């Protein structure tokens, strides 16, 4: 008998368990993977340290700061250096710095002269009235087409690997939506929000990009130490949940092939929407389908390392490639320019992405075909005379990033209805509340608070 059973040992599940441990509750985490951490996994190889999952997070809320304060004895927060402020966008085959101030906004070749003038009127435009307006429609309405093509579109490719014509703003970028709805405009809202009083803790929410010393696996290891390895069961299969009169029966097969059962009053799911059909067979498929039909972008990540770098200067966060440029990669993160000890002293480490919502066919290419594309694109974009990487790894993410599209409202409603119908069943994970690391950490607090 357990007070709580958590399904999924990714960042959300582990952080939720950390909160439950502080409450003194008896819990257990179940995960089908061979190790805890979900997609987060840092690898050190031949002088390079790279991530097989998320490459970084953002200090976007106080929950991130509180978590790192809790685990500071086992894990050191590493904030990206000043290079993170410089971000590049590809236009006509050349990298252009994304404007960071008024002067650069006026002189940048990324946006048309007409749209540069249009932005002066942005604070005076009326807020939209369609709650399900797509991000593309919102940006065209307030800023203009060139801002969509060469600012928002590449940003969405970098975050969601998605399509701004399909993403609904109030779900995919709720803070941006709030700026218009609450304050009337993006520019005016940013100014007004920045002048609102903040607590001392809120002032530390810098929105800086973070990792941890030695890679994000140290965050996972620190959480495991806090939770206790004995409370985490990995390598399980045949996981199902069944509601009985006053509790839930959780059945699974452990890694040694033995069938086991747990009784619990609370089940917290943090697993992907696509896994719920098998785990929750007692729910009407027609109702559950409103959750499980969530579309996930497929993405290929390529890790590229050079012991000696002879291409362009890597003095930024990375470069994003707008869909309009018709290239075969979504962008490249300059990981060795952001965090310490990710590559040899004179070398470079990149995380490069392909596929996404609008180019899913690229995810069906074999490794050799992927390698040829990377050789062509990186040699061209990075001014490399010879393509001889010292590290080349291909990582395929079949369920990479959920897309918060027009069906999101129905999905969230279905979640609420199921939680009301089955008291003690709590549905979390990236099917709601955002996709970033800060979002996952924030949601973990909500999930733990839902356990009365």
Image: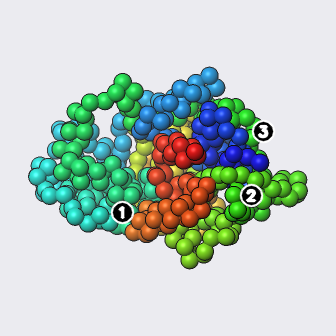
The local crowd at label 2, few if under 14, some if 14 to 19, many if 20 or more residues have their Cα within 10 Å, is: many
Q: Which of the two discs, 3 and 2, labels the residue nearer the N terminus?
A: 3
Q: Which of the two discs, 3 and 1, labels the residue nearer the N terminus?
A: 1
Q: Alpha-carbon distance for marks 2 and 1?
A: 36 Å
Secondary structure beneath label 3: helix
Decide if residue 239 is in sight here: yes
Say which mark, if any, is on residue 168: 1
Say which mark, if any, is on residue 298: none
Side (left or right) of 324 relative to 277: left
Decide if residue 375 is in sight here: no
> Would you identify the image quadrant in which residue 25 lies?
top right
Say which mark, if any, is on residue 230: 3
Q: Alpha-carbon distance for marks 3 and 1?
A: 41 Å
Secondary structure beneath label 1: loop
The local crowd at label 3, few if under 14, some if 14 to 19, many if 20 or more residues have their Cα within 10 Å, is: few
Q: Nearer the viewer, mark 3 or mark 1?
A: 3
- Find residue 249 and report its horizontal and vertical position in percent: 74, 59
Total labels: the figure holds 3
Q: How is the image coloured?
A: rainbow
* Label 2 sits on residue: 250
Which of 374/414 is in front? Answer: 414
Secondary structure beneath label 2: strand
Q: Nearer the viewer, mark 3 or mark 2?
A: 2
Q: Is residue 218 above or below residue 5?
A: above
Side (left or right) of 442 relative to 36: left
Q: Alpha-carbon distance for marks 3 and 2?
A: 18 Å
Q: Is residue 175 above or below residue 92?
A: above
* Residue occupying the point 75% across, 37% down: 229
Residue lying farthest to the front in this orientation? 245
> Would you identify the image quadrant in which residue 101 lies?
top left
């Amino acid at each position: 008998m357990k007070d709580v059973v958590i399904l999924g040992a990714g960042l959300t599940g582990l952080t939720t368990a950390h909160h439950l441990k502080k409450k003194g509750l008896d819990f257990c985490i179940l995960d089908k993977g061979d190790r805890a951490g979900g997609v987060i996994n840092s690898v050190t190889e031949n002088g390079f340290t790279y991530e097989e999952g998320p490459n970084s997070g953002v200090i976007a809320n106080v929950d991130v700061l509180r978590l790192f304060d809790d685990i500071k004895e086992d894990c050191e927060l590493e904030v990206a250096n000043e290079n993170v402020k410089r971000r590049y966008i590809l236009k006509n085959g050349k990298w252009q710095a994304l404007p960071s101030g008024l002067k650069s906004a006026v002189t940048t070749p990324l946006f048309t002269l007409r749209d540069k003038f249009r932005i002066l009127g942005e604070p005076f435009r009326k807020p939209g009235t369609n709650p399900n307006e797509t991000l593309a429609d919102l940006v065209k309405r307030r800023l203009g087409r060139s801002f969509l093509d060469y600012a928002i579109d590449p940003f969405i490719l970098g975050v969601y690997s998605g399509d701004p014509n399909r993403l609904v703003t109030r779900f995919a970028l709720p803070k941006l939506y709030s700026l218009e709805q609450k304050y009337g405009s993006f520019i005016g809202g940013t100014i007004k929000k920045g002048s609102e009083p903040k607590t001392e803790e809120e002032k530390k929410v810098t929105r800086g990009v973070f990792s941890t010393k030695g890679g994000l696996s140290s965050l996972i290891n620190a959480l495991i130490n806090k939770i206790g390895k004995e409370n985490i069961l990995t390598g399980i299969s045949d996981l199902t949940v069944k509601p009985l009169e006053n509790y839930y029966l959780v059945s699974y097969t452990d890694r040694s092939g033995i069938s086991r059962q747990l009784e619990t009053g609370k089940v917290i799911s943090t697993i992907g929407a696509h896994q719920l059909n098998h785990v929750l067979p007692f729910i009407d498929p027609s109702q559950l389908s409103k959750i499980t039909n969530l579309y996930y972008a497929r993405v290929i990540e390529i890790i590229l390392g050079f012991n000696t770098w002879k291409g362009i200067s890597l003095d930024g966060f990375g470069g994003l490639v707008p869909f309009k440029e018709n290239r075969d990669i979504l962008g490249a993160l300059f990981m060795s320019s952001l965090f310490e000890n990710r590559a040899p002293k004179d070398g470079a480490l990149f995380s490069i992405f392909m596929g996404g919502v609008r180019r899913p066919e690229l995810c069906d290419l074999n490794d050799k075909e992927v390698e040829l594309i990377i050789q062509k694109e990186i040699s061209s974009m990075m001014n490399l005379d010879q393509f001889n990487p010292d590290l080349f790894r291909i990582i395929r993410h079949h369920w990479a990033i959920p897309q918060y599209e027009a069906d999101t409202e129905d999905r969230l409603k279905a979640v609420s209805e199921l939680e009301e119908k089955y008291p003690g069943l709590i549905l979390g994970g990236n099917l709601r509340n955002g996709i970033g690391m800060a979002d996952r950490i924030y949601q973990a607090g909500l999930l733990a608070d839902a356990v009365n």
